[in-house]
Image: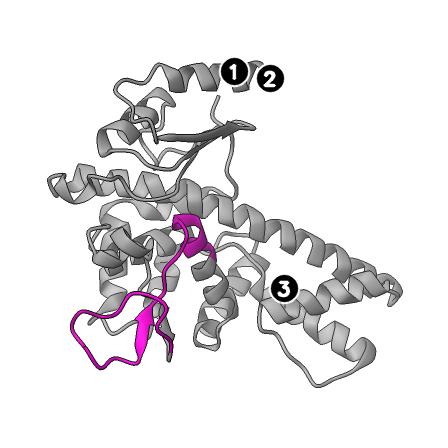
């Protein structure tokens, strides 16, 4: 309780601050609805969130729902890019926490199934719900089906490297300057087809697709992580991560960048990813297995 009060008082001390900036402060987390770049930088400073490359025992839970309101007015430089990274990193780590909770339950069920071959109806339903969510499928029935789905879910339900998530968001949105990032909270150019819902491409009046609109940045990142963990195009990504997991080490983004060649129509996407997370030392963010509260 004392920690929550201290964080709240800290928020009140930030000057200047817009009336819309603070959405909620709860359980050590700060959720921000709208803020200018100066306001979010001050919030980072107050919470000692400066160098994202330094591994430490505590990490701030500051969740931006959108990019700063004046983002496109800020001069383009490496300092701005590092702010972009600091905005996205807590969001990616929070999504990874959610995924790892699902994985923990799947691992529990694997152990129980191996030992007893006797799962409850609710546990079977959980496995089937996860299989549907992560697009795992088999025509087998009974215990054979359960075994296959559990094995496949271990490959699919796992954390995604922050370095990959952030570097691709930077490339696809030109460090948050794109129309999609501003108007749709879209960081990865996700398309929806044969619908009028979404943002219409400005360069193709006859396009049969639209760009998906997200409620906030977290929703977009969550959807991207699910796509990496489920879509057939990213099976190579999951296979490499699974090998790393079995070797008891994190799947570092620099090892996966070369496998992203088919990720988009950008020329040399692998090289762009590699350059981005190398220059900004994003590979170090892959060392954070979970998000930790700020002191």
Question: Residue lying furthest left in this view?
Answer: 75
Q: Disc 2 vs disc 3: which is toward the camera?
A: 2
Residues at marks 2 and 3, CA–CA distance in whole angstroms: 37 Å
Residue at image x 36%, y 51%?
A: 163
Is residue 63 located in the magenta-colored stretch of the structure? no
- 67 vs 131: above or below: above
Q: Quadrant of the N terminus?
A: top right
- Residue in front for this viewpoint, 246 or 63: 63
Q: Which residue is mark 2?
A: 1
Which label belongs to residue 5?
A: 1
Our reading of the magenta stretch's main secondary structure is loop
Image x and y of residue 51, in percent: 31, 32
Q: Is residue 273 left or right of residue 222?
A: left
Segment tinted magenta in the rendering = 195-222
Label 3: element kind: helix
Mark 3 or mark 1: name the one nearer the start of the chain.
Answer: 1
Label 1: element kind: helix
Residue at image x 38%, y 23%?
A: 47
Image x and y of residue 253, in percent: 38, 56
Residues at marks 2 and 1, CA–CA distance in whole angstroms: 6 Å
Residue contact at pointers 2 and 3, CB within 8 angstroms:
no
Mark 2 or mark 3: name the one nearer the start of the chain.
Answer: 2
Disc 2 residue crowd, few under 14, some 14–19, many 20+, Cα 10 Å: few
Residue at image x 47%, y 42%?
A: 288
Q: Is residue 159 visible?
A: yes
Q: Which residue is mark 3?
A: 154
Residue contact at pointers 2 and 1, CB within 8 angstroms:
yes
Q: Is residue 122 left or right of residue 93?
A: right
- 137 vs 173: above or below: below
Q: Is residue 88 left or right of residue 141?
A: left
């Amino acid at each position: 309780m004392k920690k929550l009060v201290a964080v709240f008082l800290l928020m009140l001390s930030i000057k200047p601050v817009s009336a819309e900036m603070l959405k909620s402060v709860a359980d050590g987390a700060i959720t921000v609805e709208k803020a200018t770049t100066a306001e979010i930088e001050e919030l980072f400073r107050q919470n000692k969130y400066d160098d994202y490359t330094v591994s430490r025992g505590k990490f701030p839970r500051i969740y931006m729902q959108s990019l700063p309101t004046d983002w496109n007015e800020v001069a383009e430089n490496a300092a701005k890019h590092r702010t972009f990274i600091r905005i996205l990193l807590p969001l990616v780590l929070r999504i990874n926490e959610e995924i790892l909770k699902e994985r923990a339950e799947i691992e529990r069920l694997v152990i129980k199934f191996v030992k007893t071959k006797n799962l409850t109806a609710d546990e079977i339903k959980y496995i089937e719900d996860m299989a549907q969510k992560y697009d795992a499928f088999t025509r087998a029935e009974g215990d054979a089906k359960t075994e296959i789905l559990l094995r496949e879910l271990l490959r699919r339900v796992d954390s995604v490297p922050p370095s990959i998530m952030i570097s691709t968001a930077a490339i696809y949105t030109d460090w948050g300057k794109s129309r999609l990032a501003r108007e749709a909270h879209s960081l990865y150019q996700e398309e929806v087809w044969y619908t009028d819902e979404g943002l219409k491409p400005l360069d193709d009046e006859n396009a049969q697709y639209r760009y998906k609109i997200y409620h906030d940045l977290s929703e977009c990142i969550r959807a991207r992580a699910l796509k990496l963990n489920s879509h057939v195009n990213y099976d190579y990504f999951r296979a490499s991560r699974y090998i790393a997991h079995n070797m008891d080490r994190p799947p570092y983004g620099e090892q996966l960048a070369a496998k992203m060649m088919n990720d988009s129509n950008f020329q040399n996407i692998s090289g762009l990813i590699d350059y981005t997370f190398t220059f900004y030392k994003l590979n170090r963010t892959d060392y954070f297995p979970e998000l930790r509260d700020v002191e």
